[in-house]
Every structure is written in structure tokens, then in C-alpha cells.
Image (spheres, rainbow, N blue to C red):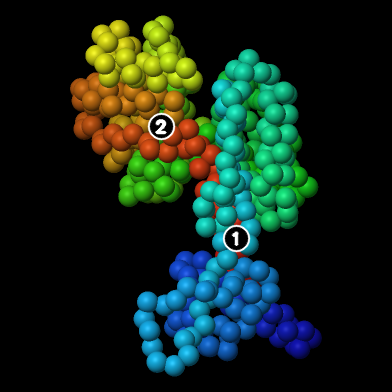
Amino acid sequence: MRNRARGHDLNALRRLNTTVVLRALHHRSPRTLAELAASTGLSRPTVEAAVEELSERGLVGESTEESAERTPGRPARRFRFRTEAGHVLGADIGLHKMVLLLADLGGTVLAAHRRDIDPELGGGARLDLLRHGTEAFLDAHAPRRAAVLARCVGVPGVVDTGGVLNSVVVPEWSGVDIGRLLQDGRPGHTLVENDVNLAVLAERWQGAATLAGDVVCVLTGHRVSCSLTIGGRLHRGRRGGAGELGMLPLLGMSTAQEALKWPGARRAGESEVAALARAADAGDPRAQAAVADFADRIAPGIAALALAVDPELIVLTGGATPVGRHLVPLLEERLRPMTLHVPRIALSSLGERGVAIGAVRKALDLVEEDLLADKAP
């Protein structure tokens, strides 16, 4: 009995040591065996055994980069985390568009696809479009499906802790576990999250909020919704609905998008908001009044969140960002009498990929949790 227990303990310790080495290489690559031993506190033979096992699993490889420090004699072998060992898929399926991104395990986007969607498309047809579009995208760019380690889909609606959606944008999806319908035979492999929650993750990762902890993200455009991070962590609330002030008609966010309708001339391929922004830039009083109306409509909801959370930063993202140059000073002016102080307001630079980038980040978090979690019981 003691021998079996000892064998189990040794196996658990070996798994833990291997994970520690992988975590170190994931954090910083490349490194030599000596550097890994020093940073992990493990013996060199233990590190060498872990690197060998990780190399067999395809997660670690020998680096071909030359070290900046040249020393006499044969250079030490250096090892790196193989970001190409797997992929993740990030998707954004909204009312008017679908965006798909394929990234490696380092978060580098390898392929992207965008498709316009008829806003009148029903829930079932929209889900089929997402399913078939995803499969075709992966067939073209990631034919080895086993290498796609996680997927995350951003949807317009509140996703509860059980994965069930509540959506006023696509009502047919309410009460449905979209993630289960999108599973590809690997339970827990596909995540579904509210789109504005993913937008704030993207801003914290690669966007305007990389140095901020308490952040309010306002997704603007055909609808307005909000999300927040507190202390750098996404705050979803008990049922996933934190920040959804757009649901409250009294605040005016639910109709704010009506202010962005622009009857003026549009260039070929130009969106309505882009045309509005161009007219506002040219000093058109009707366009400037439309942006001011939009600011009037969204300011009370943003002020409510600012008073409740006291964020250090508000990020404006989504379809209305083309008018952001005019919108930011108007919002600051309107928030001043409504709040104790006006937080810094920034415009997202991630464009229409913002939600999908957040989906990539959440999918990577799932992969890293699986690969880098302590394996010892």
C-alpha cells in the first residue's frame, strides 16, 4: 500500500514540476536550463526532465534565436514556449456583423474574417450562419481541429452562470444555452460571453485600458450597453448582468442609437456613422446636433455607473467611435454636473474587432488555466 501511495505522490510531484517549468516558459521565453532552474527553484535534472516531457508534448521547443550575451565556448541551449502548438477561436456575432479571429497561444491573430448580417435574420438562421461560418473559417485556416484548444463567442445579451442567454437583440436566443449548441464534441471547449464584457477584456488586454484597474466600457452603436472591471477583474455580477443599464428605459440608453441616424449623403461603402462623423468634422450643424443628442442620451447611464463604481477610466467602443472626437468633450461637459468627478474618457483603438479580440483573450484564459494550473491533487 505504501509503495502505491509513494508512486502516486511521485507522479503528482512530477506533474507539478512540469507545470511549474511550463508556466515559467509561458511567462518568459526563451530560457536556458540554468535560468529555468534558478527561476523555479527546481534542480537542473528535474528541469531537464520536465523540458523533455514538454518537448514530447509539443508545448516546448528549442529556440533558434541568438542570445544578446555572447560567451566563450558552446552556447547553452535555450527553450521556448511553442505558441504555435495550438490555436484559439474568437467570434463576435452581433445584429449586423460576424467577426471571426484565429489566434495562436501567444494571442497573435493568424487569420480574420468579417461578414455583414441582415439585422432581420432570425435566431435559428443566425446560429446556423455562425456555426457554418465558423466551420468554413477553420477548414480554411486550421484544418487540424485538435489544435483548436478553445473557442469563445461574443453575443448580444446577458449570459448567466449556467451559460443560458437572455437577449433583447435576438429574442429567439433567450433561454437558450448557445454554447451547448455550438459544442464540437469537447465539453467545456466552447465559451459564450456577453459582447460588452468581452469588449472590456479586450481593452484591458490590448486597448485603451491596459494600465487601468477600475474601468467602465461603453459599447455604442446600434445599441448601448456597459461592462466594468474592478481591480482589473471583469465584474459580471451574480447572474452576469452587471452594468446592463441599457435595460432601464428611464436612463435613455435604450433609444440612444436613434440619435445617430444620418439622412445626409454617404460615400460608396461608407457606414451611416462614418458619414455622420465626416459631416460633423466638416462643421455641419445637423451632424453636430446629432452627436450632441447622442451624448445627452447616454450621459445619465454613464453617470450612474461612474457614481456607483468611481472608475479611473471610461472607454467608448463600438460603432459610434467614429464620432468620438466630438463625443468625448460633450460627454465630459454633461457628466460634470452629474458626478462627483469626471473620469478620464478614452476612445477604443481596436475597431470592429474589439469584441472578437476579447473572445480570443477569454479562450486563451481557458487554455492557460488548463495547461498552467497545478496538476498535483
CA distance for labels 2 and 1: 30 Å
- Pick out the residue farthest to the bottom: 73
Q: Which mark is drawn over residue 317? A: 2
Name the residue that disc number 1 marks.
Answer: 84
Q: Which mark is drawn over residue 23? A: none
Crowd rating for badge 1 (residues with CA inside 10 Å; few <14, some 14–19, many 20+): some
Front residue of 162/172: it is 172
| Numbered disc in front, either 2 or 1 | 1
Front residue of 133/219: it is 133
At horizontal 73% and vertical 24% (from top left) the residue drawn is 124
Q: Quadrant of residue 338?
A: top left
Closer to the N terminus: mark 2 or mark 1?
1
Q: Tell me: residue 15, above or below residue 189.
A: below
Query: In this orientation, does residue 21 appear?
Result: no
At horizontal 68% and vertical 50% (from top left) the residue drawn is 142
At horizontal 63% and vertical 15% (from top left) the residue drawn is 120
Q: Secondary structure at mark 2?
A: strand
Q: Secondary structure at mark 1?
A: helix
Q: Quadrant of the C terminus?
A: bottom right
Q: Quadrant of the N terminus?
A: bottom right
Tell me which amino acid carries mark 2: Thr
Front residue of 135/141: it is 141
Tell me which amino acid carries mark 1: Glu
Q: Tell me: residue 289, above or below residue 239.
A: above
Question: x and y percent of residue 333 in the render?
Answer: 21, 23
Question: x and y percent of residue 350 in the render?
Answer: 42, 38
